[in-house]
Image (cartoon, rainbow, N blue to C red):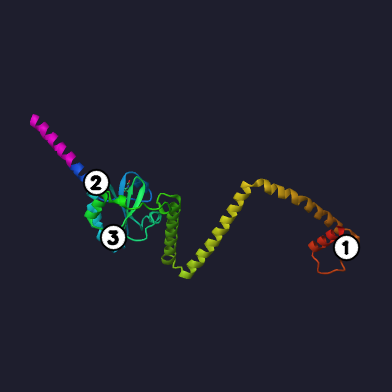
């Protein structure tokens, strides 16, 4: 009985080790950073690589990056990677103009790594704190700043429009010039709507001015009504009929100036 018990214990310990081994092996892969959780890299130290499936240099570099990820625990650095085709907002936010782009992040301070793509060089860059020799990115292009969030949003919007454009061409068979006309019309419609919303907001924000103007206009309108009444008197009618091609409004204006 005793031996059976210890056997069970050994087996369970072995199983626990096996599970731990599998889990730790999984965690040594580069961590996917997406638009939803990119703020996680603001804590602690990270290396983040931007790549795309169509970029050959990225494919060559992938094995190095995966090897680096195995050092993640020893160096106490998160090894992340972002696919720019799936996260256009991040490619805008991080101002990615070349692929692969590598960022070093420590406690929210971003630096662009532009050294060699050799595994050992990257390890010494982190381990020997060589990143301190580099200037952090300027406040203007800081990925956590408000303006870069806006750039990220524009990139996202541009990707959405591009996808719509592709669907229009491939799925609906709309010719290219047709798409441009549709986009031009949409731009005008959205511009008008935006203008309308702005005007409404202004009206809501500054209502006193609007009321004042209305009050000032009213007496004038009453005056017009008076002169309209005068129009209907028979004597005046005869007088006016001699002059042709005059609209009602000009009649009113004439009479008003005469009265003055
Ligand atoms: C971010 O999300 C991706 C996909 O959902 C996930 O694989 C990854 O582990 C997350 N990264 C972090 C740092 O939480």
Q: Residue at x 49, y 67 (%)?
A: 180
Q: Which residue is mark 3?
A: 58
Q: Residue furthest right?
A: 235
Q: Residue at x 33, y 49 (%)?
A: 105
- Quarter the C terminus occupies: bottom right
Question: What is the x, y in percent for residue 211?
Answer: 70, 47
Q: Is mark 3 within 8 Å of ligand 1?
A: no
Q: Which residues are magenta?
A: 1-17
Q: Which mark is residue 75?
A: 2
The prevailing secondary structure element of the residues shown in magenta is helix
Question: What is the x, y in percent for residue 107?
Answer: 34, 45
Vertical order, 146 against 179 (above or below): above
Q: Is residue 219 magenta?
A: no
Indicate which disc, 3 or 1, sits on the residue closer to the N terminus: 3
Q: Taking the image as drawn, is residue 37 in sight?
A: no
Report the Cα–Cα distance between label 3 and label 2. Answer: 23 Å
Vertical order, 164 against 208 (above or below): below
Q: Which mark is residue 237?
A: 1
Q: Taking the image as drawn, is residue 6 in sight?
A: yes
Question: What is the x, y in percent for residue 228?
Answer: 83, 57
Q: Nearer the viewer, mark 3 or mark 1?
A: 3
């Amino acid at each position: 009985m005793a031996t059976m018990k210890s056997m069970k214990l050994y087996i369970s310990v072995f199983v626990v080790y096996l599970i731990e081994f599998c889990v730790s092996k999984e965690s040594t892969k580069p961590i996917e950073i997406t638009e939803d959780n990119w703020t996680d890299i603001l804590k602690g130290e990270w290396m983040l690589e931007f790549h795309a499936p169509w970029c050959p240099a990225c494919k060559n570099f992938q094995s190095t990056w995966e090897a680096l990820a195995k050092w993640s625990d020893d160096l106490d650095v998160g090894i992340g990677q972002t696919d720019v085709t799936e996260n256009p907002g991040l490619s805008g936010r991080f101002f990615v103009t070349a692929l692969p782009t590598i960022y070093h992040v420590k406690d929210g301070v971003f630096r662009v790594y532009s050294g060699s793509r050799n595994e050992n060089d990257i390890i010494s860059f982190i381990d020997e704190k060589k990143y301190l020799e580099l200037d952090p990115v300027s406040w203007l292009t800081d990925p956590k700043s408000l303006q870069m969030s806006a750039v990220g949003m524009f990139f996202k919007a541009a990707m959405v429009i591009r996808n719509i454009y592709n669907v229009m061409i491939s799925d609906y068979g709309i010719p290219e010039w047709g798409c441009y006309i549709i986009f031009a019309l949409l731009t005008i419609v959205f511009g008008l709507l935006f203008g309308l919303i702005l005007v409404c907001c202004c009206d809501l924000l500054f209502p006193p001015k609007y009321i004042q103007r209305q009050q000032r206009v009213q007496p004038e309108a009453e005056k017009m009504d008076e002169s309209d009444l005068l129009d209907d008197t028979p004597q005046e009618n005869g007088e006016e009929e001699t002059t042709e091609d005059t609209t009602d409004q000009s009649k009113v204006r004439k009479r008003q100036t005469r009265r003055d």
